[in-house]
Image (cartoon, coloured by chain):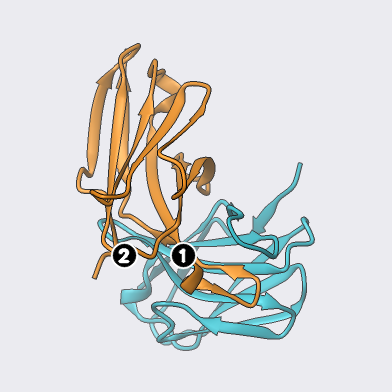
Chain colours: A orange, B cyan
Amino acid sequence: DQQVKQNSPSLSVQEGRISILNCDYTNSMFDYFLWYKKYPAEGPTFLISISSIKDKNEDGRFTVFLNKSAKHLSLHIVPSQPGDSAVYFCAASALALYFQGAQKLVFGQGTRLTINP
Amino acid sequence: DVKVTQSSRYLVKRTGEKVFLECVQDMDHENMFWYRQDPGLGLRLIYFSYDVKMKEKGDIPEGYSVSREKKERFSLILESASTNQTSMYLCASSPKGQHYGYTFGSGTRLTVV
């Protein structure tokens, strides 16, 4: 069963507008969430994270919102730029997934974001 | 520039072959991970290692094994490759501790024919 779900396989947004990528999770034990960005032929790179004790975290054009009661998080990109075109993965972790100093992450399916000029 | 390096970008192997995927990191990280990425399924954890010679199964370990003889190197082994192991394989590393993100390699696209 997919504990972290990104229900939109793709999203197309006009340059300069806001991009909103969504992620839902089912495991209430998740306490830390991350977003990764992946370009073709490259590995995912870390973008932004949020702890479950917060409901918002901002880093430049990127903001992540967490709604624990709805088990939902979203990534907002404002304004969207052509270089933001990539696949975005949502990931989650929990204390139960922490073993011998190694934190396992559970990833969603990814959303392909295309920014149109 | 800190790195996770995967030795092959593309590999084509025959069914039944033994396949080795190599990963090296230069960040002195304790933890290393192997994931596979498939369309519609995202990234799924195959195995991870938290120390030299120490390994743990992930969510989909069947058909795979791993080796970590040195801290910087983590190998994924497909004992007898099958077509359903055609995938993108991603290696990652992280420091010891909670809430650290991973640093990923560029991936190896493996095709089993």
Checking the image for residue A94, the label placed there is: 1
Q: Position of residue B74 (x, y in %)?
A: 66, 73
Q: Position of residue B96 (x, y in %)?
A: 69, 65
**Tag 1–tag 2 contact (CB < 8 Å):** yes
Return the x and y of residue B21 as percentages of the image width and height. Answer: 58, 71
Q: Circle 2 marks a residue in which chain?
A: A
Q: Which residue carries the number 2 mark?
A: A27
Horizontal side of residue A96 vs A68, given as left or right: right
Q: CA distance from mark 1 to mark 2?
A: 9 Å
Q: Is residue B73 left or right of residue B62?
A: right
**Depth order, front residue of B27/B81:** B27
Residue B61 vertical position relative to residue B87 in the rendered view, above or below: below
* Dot 1 crowding, Cα within 10 Å, few <14, some 14–19, many 20+: some
Q: Residue at x 46, y 78 (%)?
A: B58
Q: Secondary structure at mark 1?
A: loop
- Residues tagged by mark 1 and mark 2 found on one chain of the structure: yes
User: Callout 1: residue from which chain?
Assistant: A
In this image, B23 relative to A29: left or right? right
Q: Amino acid at mark 1?
A: Ala
Number of marks in the rendered image? 2
